[in-house]
C-alpha cells in the first residue's frame, strides 16, 4: 500500500493549469485517504470548469496508475479568495495573515483578540457553538453532521473541536492526516468540504490532556490566531459538555456567537442541558434551537418507533429556553463501509434519512443567521 509521501511524489509534477505551480507544493491536493488499493483526494483549482477538471483528472489518474493505483476517487473545488491570495502573493495576502499580528498581545485573557480578523464582527463569519449539559448525548455527532450539511448547501465552513479533553472530531470524520504548517501558519485539514482543527491532531497515541483552565483558553485562542482559515461563512465549535472554562472563554472571545443545545429525550438529560442554555442566555448569546438526539429507534423491518429514552425532553428544554426544537434525530449509526473512498464512522450521507434531516436543520440555521 502506498504512503501519503509516495502519493505526493507521484503527483508533484502536476501543475495548476493557470499559475503553473505544483499542486502538491502549494498544498492544493488534500484529503489524502488511502485504503488498501483505493485512494481518495480533494483537488483545489483556480478555475473549476469542465475542461480544467477533465484535464487534471486525466493527469492525476495517469500518474497514480503508473504507481499501481487504479481505483481513484477525486473531488474538485474552486479556490477561495484567501487561497488565491496565498498562492498568488500580493499585499492583501500579507495583510490578511493573522500571524503578522503581535502574538504577545494574546497572553492576557481575551486580550489582543480585536487584532484577529476572523473574530471581527465585520468579517461576516457566523459562529455557532454546539453545547450540551452532559456527555454521551451525541453532541459531537450533531456538530460534524451540521458542519457537513452546511458545506453541502454551498457554504464555506470551518469546525473547531473545542472539546479539548474529549476530542473526537478527527476520528468521527475519518481524518487520517494532520494539518500542514506553511510559513509558520497552521493549515486546517479539509474533509467533506469542512476545514477542521482539533486538539486531537497534536496528541500522540491518544494520550489524555492534563491541563488547567488557563492552558485550555490559550490553546483555543491559538486556534483563532495561528490557523489560516481563509474565507468562511460559518465556524462551528464543538463545546465540551457542561459550563466550564472553554465555554466561558468562547462566550468572552466571541460575543456574537450563537448556540445550539443538544439533548436526548430523557428528562434528566434535558434538565442538565438547560444549564448550558441558561449560560448562553446570561452571556447574551442567542440560542438558535434545540436538537433532540437519540429520539427514538425505528425498526428497519416494520418501521415501528421505540422511544427508548422516553419522550418530550427536547420540547420541554426548548420551551424553557424560549427557543424551538429544531429536529429529532433517531438512534442509529451511518451505514458507511470502511471500503468506501469517503468512509467516516459518523457522517451521514446526503441521500440517507438522517442526512436529509441534517440538511433541513442546516437550511433552518442559514435562514436564522442570514436573515439580516
Image (spheres, rainbow, N blue to C red):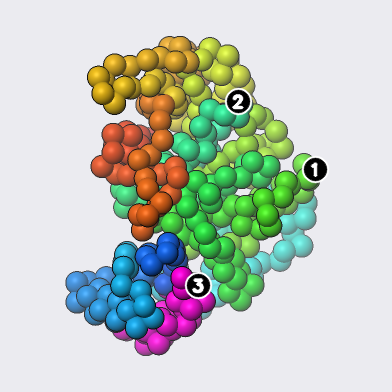
Q: Which residues are magenta?
A: 1-28
Secondary-structure class at tag 2: loop
In this rendering, which labeled residue sits more in front, label 1 or label 3?
3
Up the image or down, 157 lies above or below 34; here it is: above
The residue sitting at 57% across, 69% down in the picture is: 180
Give the spatial CA distance, label 1 vs label 3.
Answer: 37 Å
Up the image or down, 355 lies above or below 42; here it is: above
Instruction: Answer with the quarter of the image where residue 347 lies.
Output: top left
The residue at which mark 1 appears reads as 212
Give the spatial CA distance, label 2 vs label 3.
Answer: 41 Å
Instruction: Answer with the quarter of the image where residue 99 lies.
Output: bottom right
Give the spatial CA distance, label 1 vs label 2.
Answer: 20 Å
Give whichever of discs 1 and 3 has the lower sequence position. 3
In this rendering, which labeled residue sits more in front, label 2 or label 3?
3
Q: Which mark is residue 133?
A: 2
Q: Magenta span: helix, strand or loop, mainly?
A: loop
The residue at which mark 3 appears reads as 3
The residue sitting at 56% across, 55% down in the picture is: 197
* Percent position of residue 57, x then y: 27, 75
Amino acid at each position: 500500500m502506498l504512503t501519503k509521501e509516495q502519493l505526493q511524489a507521484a503527483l508533484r509534477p502536476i501543475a495548476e493549469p493557470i499559475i503553473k505551480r505544483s499542486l502538491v507544493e502549494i498544498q492544493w491536493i488534500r484529503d489524502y485517504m488511502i485504503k488498501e488499493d483505493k485512494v481518495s483526494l480533494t483537488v483545489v483549482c483556480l478555475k473549476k470548469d469542465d475542461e480544467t477538471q477533465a484535464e487534471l483528472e486525466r493527469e492525476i489518474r495517469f500518474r497514480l496508475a503508473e504507481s499501481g493505483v487504479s481505483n481513484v476517487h477525486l473531488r474538485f473545488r474552486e479556490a477561495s479568495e484567501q487561497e488565491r491570495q496565498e498562492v498568488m502573493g500580493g499585499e492583501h495576502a500579507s495583510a490578511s495573515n493573522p500571524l503578522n499580528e503581535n502574538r504577545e498581545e494574546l497572553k492576557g485573557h481575551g486580550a489582543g483578540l480585536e487584532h484577529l480578523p476572523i473574530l471581527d464582527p465585520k468579517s461576516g463569519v457566523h459562529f455557532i457553538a454546539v453545547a450540551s449539559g452532559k456527555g454521551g448525548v451525541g453532541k459531537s455527532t450533531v456538530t460534524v453532521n451540521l458542519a457537513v450539511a452546511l458545506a453541502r448547501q454551498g457554504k464555506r465552513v470551518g469546525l473547531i473541536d473545542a472539546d479539548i479533553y474529549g476530542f473526537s472530531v478527527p476520528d468521527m470524520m475519518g481524518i487520517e492526516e494532520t494539518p500542514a504548517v506553511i510559513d509558520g501558519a497552521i493549515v486546517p485539514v479539509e474533509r467533506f468540504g469542512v476545514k477542521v482543527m482539533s486538539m486531537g491532531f497534536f496528541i500522540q497515541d491518544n494520550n489524555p490532556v492534563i491541563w488547567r483552565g488557563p492552558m485550555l483558553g490559550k490553546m483555543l485562542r491559538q486556534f483563532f490566531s495561528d490557523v489560516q482559515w481563509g474565507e468562511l461563512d460559518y465556524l462551528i465549535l464543538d463545546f465540551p459538555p457542561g459550563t466550564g472554562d472553554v465555554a466561558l472563554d468562547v462566550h468572552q472571545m466571541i460575543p456574537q456567537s450563537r448556540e445550539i443545545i443538544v439533548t436526548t429525550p430523557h428528562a434528566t438529560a434535558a434538565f442538565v442541558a438547560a444549564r448550558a442554555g441558561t449560560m448562553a442566555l446570561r452571556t447574551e448569546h442567542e440560542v438558535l434551537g434545540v436538537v433532540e438526539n437519540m429520539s427514538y429507534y425505528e425498526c428497519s423491518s416494520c418501521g415501528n418507533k421505540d422511544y427508548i429514552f422516553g419522550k418530550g425532553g427536547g420540547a420541554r428544554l426548548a420551551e424553557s429556553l424560549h427557543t424551538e426544537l429544531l429536529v429529532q434525530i433517531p438512534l442509529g449509526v451511518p451505514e458507511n463501509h470502511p471500503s468506501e473512498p469517503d468512509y467516516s464512522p459518523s457522517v451521514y450521507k446526503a441521500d440517507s434519512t438522517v442526512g436529509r434531516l441534517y440538511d433541513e436543520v442546516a437550511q433552518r440555521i442559514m435562514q436564522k443567521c442570514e436573515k439580516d
